[in-house]
Amino acid sequence: MVIKEVQVKGIITKSNLPDADYVVNPYVGCQHACNYCYAEFMKRFTNHNEDWGSFVDVKANALDVLGNIERVRGKKVLFSSVTDPYHPVEVRYKLTRKLLQALVPAQPRVEILTKGRMVTRDIDVLTQYEDATVGVSIATLDESASRSIEPLAALPRLRLDAIKRCKEAGLKTYVFLSPIFPGITEVEDIVQQAAPYVDYFMFENLNLRPLNMERIMRYIRENHPELQDLYAKIYVEKNVTFWDEMEDRIRAVCQSVGKESRIYFHHGGFDKK
């Protein structure tokens, strides 16, 4: 793992996401090394030749370039969009914690999205916000599969425990089923297990791009050969029937547990960009 400290010009960035006004990415790169990660495109802008998941740049001067924090008062600020705010290097640098502490006086509407369990460390800071939401993303409950597709992320049961603890502390919470791997992600089981501890669920289908398509297809060939025909139908023939039926399943199971479902599906689960 290549870890280096870098200097940046700013840390709070205007967001192009539909549900956030600003994003904060304390790091460049991510140690979780998820084989499906869409954020690998960031290598284009960082002069890194290493494999995605094998490097992290620490934005060492992040606190010095916060600028006028009043601009985020009442705005939605997401930690993070192209990194994980709680991947392992956060233990050493505590950048996410320091930035959260620094923004408390401005009272933005803070949202955390992570695959790490370390978010519970910062419950004391998050509860100082009038509006704070914590989400964890889960692709599968199977620990062996999780270790294969997201090697250094916290195990799914630990993420569920973290969201439970955040909910018990009075924070708003959600589980993001992302990405949904056809034939692998246990949608109904995840919803039913997490329902007591979340305010709502979000869903995203597995979105294959040229950067990650070969990795995913190789993983399916080697670990789930019985699913090769299904993946070819979805991602080669671009048949959207599977995702149409998945939306029906999602709405049904969320209705059964009395929770809102927010579905962010990419058409056909394939993106040429």
Image: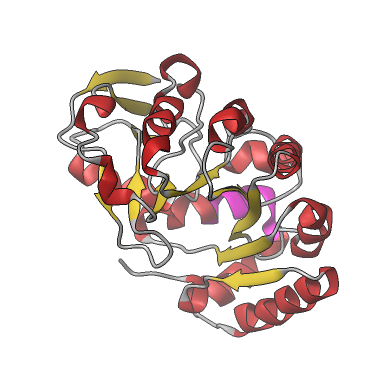
Is residue 222 placed above or below 50 in the rendered structure?
below
Lateral position of residue 86 relative to residue 20, left or right = right
Instruction: Examine the rendering and report whether any part of residue 42 can be seen.
Output: yes
Identified at 59% across, 43% down, the residue is: 149
Residue farthest toward the left in the current orientation of the protein: 9
Residue farthest toward the top in the current orientation of the protein: 92
Q: Is residue 123 magenta?
A: no
Q: Nearer the viewer, residue 99 or 81?
A: 99
Q: Quadrant of residue 176?
A: bottom right
Identified at 26% across, 38% down, the residue is: 11
Lateral position of residue 241 relative to residue 93, left or right = right
Lateral position of residue 60 relative to residue 142, left or right = left
Instruction: Examine the rendering and report whether any part of residue 138 can be seen.
Output: no
Where residue 221 appears, x then y in whole percent?
61, 54
Q: Nearer the viewer, residue 24 or 32?
A: 24
Where residue 185 appears, x then y in whole percent?
70, 58
The number of discs equals: 0
Question: In terms of secondary structure, what is the magenta stretch mainly?
Answer: helix
Where residue 60 appears, x then y in whole percent?
27, 21
Where residue 229 appears, x then y in whole percent?
64, 70
Lateral position of residue 17 relative to residue 127, left or right = left
Is residue 14 placed above or below 241 in the rendered structure?
above
Q: Nearer the viewer, residue 107 or 117?
A: 107
Identified at 23% across, 33% down, the residue is: 48
Q: Which residues are magenta?
A: 217-225
Q: Nearer the viewer, residue 83 or 267?
A: 83
Q: Quadrant of the N terminus?
A: top left
Q: Is residue 220 magenta?
A: yes
Q: Quadrant of the C terminus?
A: bottom left
The colour scheme used to paint the residues is: secondary structure
Identified at 24% across, 33% down, the residue is: 49
